[in-house]
Amino acid sequence: MTRNHFAIQRSLERDGSEIVTEDAWLAKVPAMSACLAETRRYQTDPEYAAAQDADRADRQAAVYDKMDAGVARFWAGRKAVS
């Protein structure tokens, strides 16, 4: 077993499983591999990284715009009461 195997095993144990079987560990390998492939592509493909950054910015703007509007309404209501 490699050092990386032990790190992954410890992370799986922190997921709440008291006993992590080899089958449970192996079931997570495809997801971990996909995550590593995604990270590698993001780091090596500038066009892909730019598209991902733009998508992330759009999603964050949608969330923060809604949140900012709610905060503005809250403070407008507080100022009206004062």
Image (cartoon, rainbow, N blue to C red):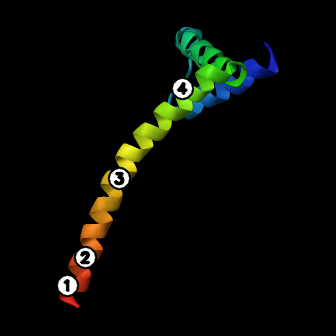
Of 55 and 8, the residue lying toward us: 55
Image quadrant in which the N terminus is located: top right
Tell whether label 1 touches label 2 (CB within 8 Å). yes
What's the distance in space between the residues labelled 3 and 1, CA to CA?
A: 22 Å
Whether 68 is drawn above or below 56: the answer is below
Report x, y in % for residue 27. 52, 10
Residue under numbered circle 1: 80
Report x, y in % for residue 56. 49, 35
Instruction: Decide which of tag 4 and tag 1 comes sooner along the chain.
Output: 4
Please give left or right for residue 79 compared with residue 46 in the image: left
Of 17 and 71, the residue lying toward us: 71
Whether 79 is drawn above or below 8: the answer is below
Residue under numbered circle 3: 65
What's the distance in space between the residues labelled 4 and 3, CA to CA?
A: 21 Å
Give the SS element for disc 1: helix
What's the distance in space between the residues labelled 4 and 2, CA to CA?
A: 37 Å
Instruction: Decide which of tag 4 and tag 2 comes sooner along the chain.
Output: 4
Residue 18 appears in the picture as rendered: no
In the rendered picture of this protein, how many numbered marks are placed on residues? Answer: 4
Report x, y in % for residue 82. 23, 91
Question: Label 3 amino acid?
Answer: Asp
Residue under numbered circle 2: 76
Whether 9 is drawn above or below 76: the answer is above
What's the distance in space between the residues labelled 2 and 1, CA to CA?
A: 6 Å
* Pointer 1 local density, CA inside 10 Å: few below 14, some 14–19, many at least 20: few
Residue under numbered circle 4: 51
